[in-house]
């Protein structure tokens, strides 16, 4: 029996990168997993991988920017499992890398929608279900760029993630007396496809990142998953509205 036996865990953006790594970590601890994502082929591959690991898992195709699809996701979770104990709102994108004046309105809106609106919509319906239950845990995906947003060419992403961190604190204060505990994690560069720049190899990305971080290396997805599991566990029962920055010391510079 693991720490999360008999717990139902939703992970948005759960088919790749940090989301999938976290899903695998929760599954090893006995959780029932629901992964949600826009890309069906990736979702089905992640579903198959988790099944191979012996997980009780569902994949529900979901665009977190769509109210109707997020509502459907929550209805399906409750219909299949009767409850939602833990949610990791991980879905996001860094968007285009351009100076603010060169970003189109459509590009700006898309980045804000996936990272900020999608987190809000997910929380909206997760909280509604958790209020019925009288308990629940939510972990949101922030970014160290939202904390230390002086990097050029990622203005929409930095703005969205700063918004997620503020939204986390507001919701944490609003719902802790109802038994819902809400926090966030804010990674720096992690060895996932999202951290690579256009045309960059894995090795080039790792070298570039290593020179910019005091720790001297890129982060691993497992390191973020460990923090999410801790925040979701009874071990973090007194942690409310906190943002854990996991960035190898970048924000100290």
Image (cartoon, helix red, strand yellow):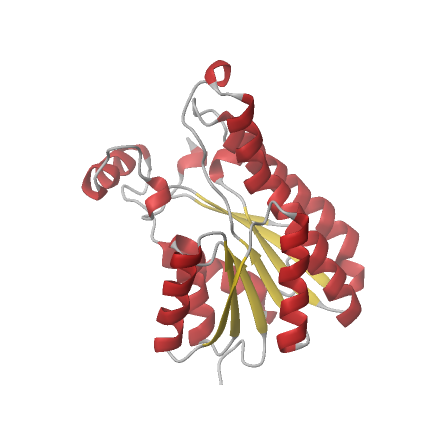
Q: Which image quarter holds the C terminus?
A: top left
Residue 127 quadrant: bottom right
Question: Which sits in the foreground, 229 or 160?
Answer: 160
Residue extending farthest to the bottom is 1
Q: Is residue 130 left or right of residue 90?
A: right
Vertical relation: 188 (above or below) 228: above
Quadrant of the image occupied by residue 62: bottom right
Tell me if 57 is positioned left or right of 211 in this view: right
* Residue 12: percent from left, percent from top: 53, 56
Numbered marks: total: 0
Residue at position x 22%, y 43% in the image? 202
Q: Position of residue 160 (x, y in %)?
A: 57, 35
Can see residue 76? yes
Query: Where is residue 53 shown, x and y percent of the image?
Result: 36, 77
Q: Please give left or right for residue 203 compared with residue 157 in the image.
A: left
Residue 84 in sight from this viewpoint: no
| Outermost residue to the top | 101
Q: Position of residue 107 (x, y in %)?
A: 51, 28
- The relative height of residue 244 versus residue 7 in the rendered view (above or below) is above
């Amino acid at each position: 029996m693991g720490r999360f036996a008999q717990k139902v865990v939703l992970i948005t953006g759960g088919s790749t990168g940090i989301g999938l790594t976290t899903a695998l970590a929760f599954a090893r601890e006995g959780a029932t997993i629901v992964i949600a994502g826009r890309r069906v082929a990736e979702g089905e591959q992640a579903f198959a991988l988790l099944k191979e690991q012996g997980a009780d898992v569902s994949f529900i195709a979901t665009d977190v920017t769509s109210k109707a699809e997020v509502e459907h996701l929550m209805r399906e979770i409750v219909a299949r499992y009767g409850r939602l104990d833990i949610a990791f709102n991980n879905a996001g994108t860094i968007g285009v890398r351009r100076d603010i004046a060169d970003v189109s309105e459509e590009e700006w809106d898309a980045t804000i929608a996936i990272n900020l609106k999608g987190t809000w919509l997910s929380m909206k319906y997760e909280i509604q279900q958790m209020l019925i239950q009288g308990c629940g845990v939510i972990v949101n995906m922030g970014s160290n760029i939202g904390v230390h947003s002086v990097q050029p060419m990622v203005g929409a992403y930095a703005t969205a993630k700063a918004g997620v961190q503020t939204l986390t604190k507001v919701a944490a204060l609003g719902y802790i007396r109802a038994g819902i505990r809400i926090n966030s994690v804010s990674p720096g560069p992690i060895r996932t496809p999202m951290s690579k720049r256009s045309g960059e190899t894995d090795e080039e990305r790792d070298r570039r990142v290593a020179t910019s971080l005091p720790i001297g290396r890129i982060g691993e997805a497992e390191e973020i998953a460990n923090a999410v599991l801790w925040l979701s566990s009874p071990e973090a029962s007194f942690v409310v509205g906190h943002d854990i920055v996991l960035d190898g010391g970048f924000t100290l510079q």
